Image: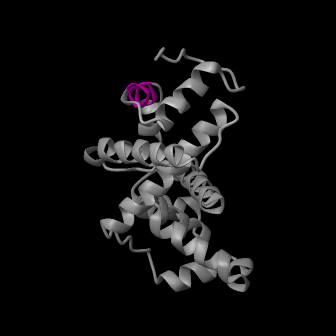
Amino acid sequence: MPALRGGLPTAMSDDLNELLKGISAGRPDALEVLCKVYYRYVVSLLRWYKVPQESVEDLAQDVFFKFCQKVQDGGVNFKSEASLKAYLKRCAFTIWVDYVRKNKRAFILVDDPEESVQALDVQSRDNPELRAAVFEILEILSPEDREIIVMIDVKRMTHAEAARLRGVTPATSKNQLHDARKRFRELYRCRQDD
């Protein structure tokens, strides 16, 4: 099996088609090539989800295993490398959510979870599905991300107040909130795709 060349075009290349056929046929060399090409991408996703370092490699293997199972079952069809990467991203997200649930990493909100979710906005109170999604994502976020979101968006603290309580500068508080909101939106999008 030829190794995939870096920088694949957005249209499905012959190498990528051959790789997927090899995975579908259960060829170990195809899986090896897939792992070599996309391992860093999957690991970076898992690190972005704040998976503890000691678990990253195991979860990356789980992502590739799940991906290969779906390809072998014929449950996925890729039109481009971008769609393949999007599917790997979805696999990484679901593996990560399973990891959080299995390890019972119950993340405690700053205050009562019900009160926090209700305070987010009127739309979430009036929409039970949105409310459940917000609560689930807040539960999944890292404690640091959840804390800054709850302080600023739920409790309506100023950045100066939140920064003082957290022992950082207001500028750091703004940066942390920006990053936390970005992760929240990404998790929400991934949840909607599932």
In x, y percent, where is residue 6?
Answer: 55, 16
Up/down of 164 relative to 109, above or below: above
In x, y percent, where is residue 31?
Answer: 41, 31
Bounds of the magenta segment: 29-36
| Image point (47%, 35%), residue name | 25
Toward the front, the furthest residue is 25
Up/down of 152 relative to 185, above or below: below
Up/down of 96 relative to 58, above or below: below
Q: Nearer the viewer, residue 7 or 11?
A: 11
Res. 34 visible in picture? yes
Up/down of 90 relative to 108, above or below: above
Q: Main secondary structure of the magenta part?
A: helix
| 31 with respect to 11 (left or right) | left
Q: Nearer the viewer, residue 194 or 109?
A: 194
| Image point (38%, 27%), residue name | 32
Res. 171 visible in picture? no
| 185 with respect to 28 (left or right) | right
Toward the left, the furthest residue is 54
Q: Quadrant of the C terminus?
A: bottom right
- In which image quadrant can residue 13 be found? top right
In x, y percent, where is residue 35?
Answer: 41, 30
